[in-house]
Image (cartoon, rainbow, N blue to C red):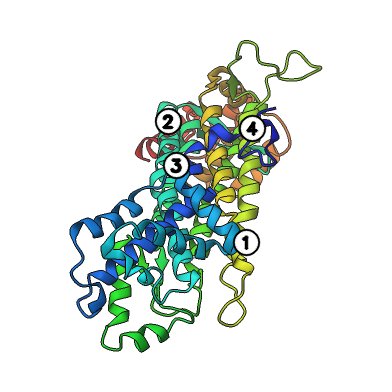
Amino acid sequence: MTNVLNAISPIDGRYADKCAELRPLFSERGLIRQRVRVEALWLKALAANPRIVELRGLSGESLGVLDALAADLTDAEAGEVKNYERETNHDVKAIEYFVKSRLGVMAEWRSRREFVHFACTSEDINNLSYALMLKEARDQVMLPRLDALIERLRALAHANAAVPMMSRTHGQPATPTTLGKEIANFVYRLQRQRVRYAAVAIEGKINGAVGNFNAHLVAYPDVDWSLLSQGFVESLGLTFNPYTTQIEPHDWNAEYFDALARINTVLIDLCRDLWGYISIGYFRQRVVAGETGSSTMPHKVNPIDFENGEGNLGLSNALLRFLADKLPISRWQRDLTDSTVLRNIGVAVSHALIAWRSIERGLDRIDVDAARLAADLNANWELLAEPIQTVMRRYGVENAYEQLKSLTRGQRVTPEALRAFVEQLAIPPAARQALMALTPATYVGNAAELAQRV
């Protein structure tokens, strides 16, 4: 059997092709790549500081080796790191030895290799590496994918902005809207949550064993380590956190995961609504040749994409909520409970991406059944009880609500019966004519305008 068939997680098996672009970021190789990058660039930052005299005068070629290490990492090089780890039983120490081995081939570096991992604790390297992983995942994969989904929904909202639809509140027939307006609600919500997700400041630190630059200041008391560290963290595109213990406290991680979870929650709501609209026939699903809907009922075309989306969104949120709750908590200056947990961030994000793709696929396979929408509206003329009693109130008709309640509550009302009721009302002729002309399909307020505006 292939590796895919042997995978325990569907992320690396059944759904591998649906989150492939996250694999280089969140895999073990992806983590090694970022660790090597941080180690190499930290050494370069040290070399750029004139007060660290031992690193003065390095040639462009020597510094270029650091740039090359930071730029990319081959599979073979990642394998070398894992070989070191088998010896050290320490993943970050393995990175240090790997970088030292690469520098050792150059005469200028041989006497300076001990500056690799200088004054660092493992968490200095790790917190920045995970921050870079999550930043790249958000900026390069998740936001573009979310934007594509929002645009797909926006197009659906605009195309159906004026298509009237009966609402359902508490599952019961309610004031009409338009199909486009109901989709536009989700577009607006997702846009709002996208802004918050994109705005999360991804933080990092590189300040030693307990966050006070203890060893740094003993070795080089004249170096402004706070300034150097801030500049280094910001050069990575991250926000500097000056107050930490041994670990960066992960508060930004919680903000990041909460923001992503809120996007997922909006999409769970969307999946359930679309599932329901398919169930009552407002959307028809296109038949795909050769596809089976049920192993025993040949007629079925199931809304599997929205169901798959909802399931993966729920799984993603379960992990995201756990990560957001757990990661900001650490005993005293450090414990290792975050270490194994952080290795699962890619799982949480991947389930979200799989779900977003499922929703897009589902949207591509549905068509609006305008006739079914119109039939529902035409069968529920009692929906006009609301505007009639509201106009009656305007003109001082006594017991307006109660009169319409008696006429319509819990029963079907024909257009003729409703118009006969309106004809006898003591209201201005123009108001009466406006109510007589009203139908469930035209009683949609400014829904079409709102749908187009989003």
Cα separation between marks 1 and 3:
28 Å
Q: Is residue 249 left or right of residue 59?
A: right
Q: Write the residue at 64% across / 68% down.
A: 337
Cα separation between marks 4 and 1:
24 Å
Residue that label 3 marks: 146
Q: Earlier in the sequence, mark 4 or mark 1?
A: 4
* Residue 340 disc label: 1
Q: Nearer the viewer, mark 2 or mark 4?
A: 4
Question: Considering the numbered disc 1 on the image, is that residue within a helix, a strand or a loop?
Answer: helix
Cα separation between marks 2 and 1:
48 Å
Q: Write the residue at 28% across / 75% down.
A: 228
* Residue 161 disc label: 2
Cα separation between marks 2 and 4:
44 Å
Q: Nearer the viewer, mark 1 or mark 3?
A: 1
Residue 114 at x, y = what percent?
38, 72
Q: Residue furthest top?
A: 289
Question: Considering the numbered disc 2 on the image, is that residue within a helix, a strand or a loop?
Answer: loop
Q: Write the residue at 43% across / 55% down.
A: 34
Amino acid type shown at disc 2: Ala
Question: Considering the numbered disc 4 on the image, is that residue within a helix, a strand or a loop?
Answer: helix
Amino acid type shown at disc 1: Thr
Q: Write the residue at 39% across / 45% down.
A: 140
Residue 12 at x, y = what percent?
61, 38
